[in-house]
Amino acid sequence: MATTPDTQKNNPANVSLGKTNVTGYAYWAPKGTALPADAATALPAAYIGLGYIGEDGITNASDSETTDVKEMGGENVLSIITSYSETYQFVLIEAMRKSAAQIRYGEQNVTGEDGALSITHTMPDDTEFVLVVELALTGNKKDRFVIPRAVRKEFGDRTLSGTEVLGYDVTLGALPSDLINGGTSREYIGSATAAANTTGE
């Protein structure tokens, strides 16, 4: 039976808060690692957790530019979206975690193990990698974002003091990927039916 505005009732079960996920919030893996294809399937062992994220959480931002076409009388007759970009920004507060430092400075510039690191501060590493961001939702569901082509984009200042947490403020760009039909990210909510994993570009 076809739905009508009268039958499409508001449903409080569709309302949710992003909650703590004890197993982690963000993971990275080398480019080409198999991508998750739903919200529920466990990530392969190749994905490395980035540890605690600061209290402000993860900001997923998008930006687009539009060109307006006007006719000779000045009336806007057409609007065309000419560009689109997407980013993920967060603060990694486990400064002594190797994977967190690698996201900030690049995999090749961080050696050692958690708690005992050697970090070379140098030009940012533009190597692409896979990023997965996860939140636990109300009702025992999950919100999973898959970014096949993540790249380091911007870095916030680090304040070295005895009163502020030592962390890495990073903004990662999400580049278009043929693996998700030219999209920059793919979001899976709930427990979707598992589909075959896709290997990276």
Image (cartoon, rainbow, N blue to C red):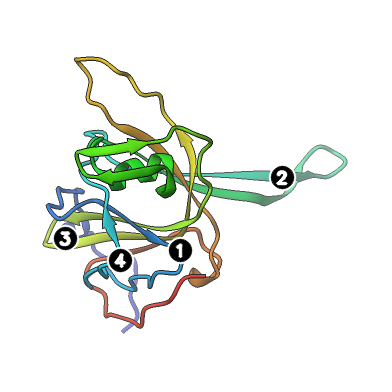
Give the amino acid type for the residue marked by disc 3 in the picture. Answer: Ala
The residue sitting at 27% across, 48% down in the picture is: 50
Q: Which one is in front in this view, the residue at disc 3 or the one at disc 2?
A: 2
Q: Which one is in front in this view, the residue at disc 1 or the one at disc 3?
A: 1
Residue ID for mark 3: 13
Q: Can residue 103 be spotted in the picture? A: yes
In this rendered view, identify the residue nearer to me: 101 or 15. 101
Give the amino acid type for the residue marked by disc 2 in the picture. Answer: Thr
- Quadrant in the picture for residue 6: bottom left
Give the amino acid type for the residue marked by disc 1 in the picture. Answer: Lys
**Figure label count:** 4
In this rendered view, identify the residue nearer to me: 10 or 101. 101
In this rendered view, identify the residue nearer to me: 18 or 124. 124
Where residue 163 sits: x, y (%)?
Answer: 19, 15
Extreme right residue here? 72
CA gap, disc 4 and disc 2:
42 Å
Where residue 116 sits: x, y (%)?
Answer: 22, 38
Q: Secondary structure at mark 3?
A: helix
Residue ID for mark 2: 67
CA gap, disc 3 and disc 2:
39 Å
CA gap, disc 4 and disc 3:
34 Å
The residue sitting at 42% across, 35% down in the picture is: 120
Q: Residues within 10 Å of mark 2 (few under 14, many from 20)?
A: few
CA gap, disc 1 and disc 4:
11 Å
- Quadrant in the picture for residue 171: top left
The residue sitting at 15% across, 52% down in the picture is: 21
Residue ID for mark 1: 31
Residue 37 horizontal side relative to residue 82, left or right: left
Where residue 8 sits: x, y (%)?
Answer: 28, 67
Residue ID for mark 4: 46
Q: Secondary structure at mark 2?
A: strand
Dot 4 or dot 2, earlier in sequence: 4
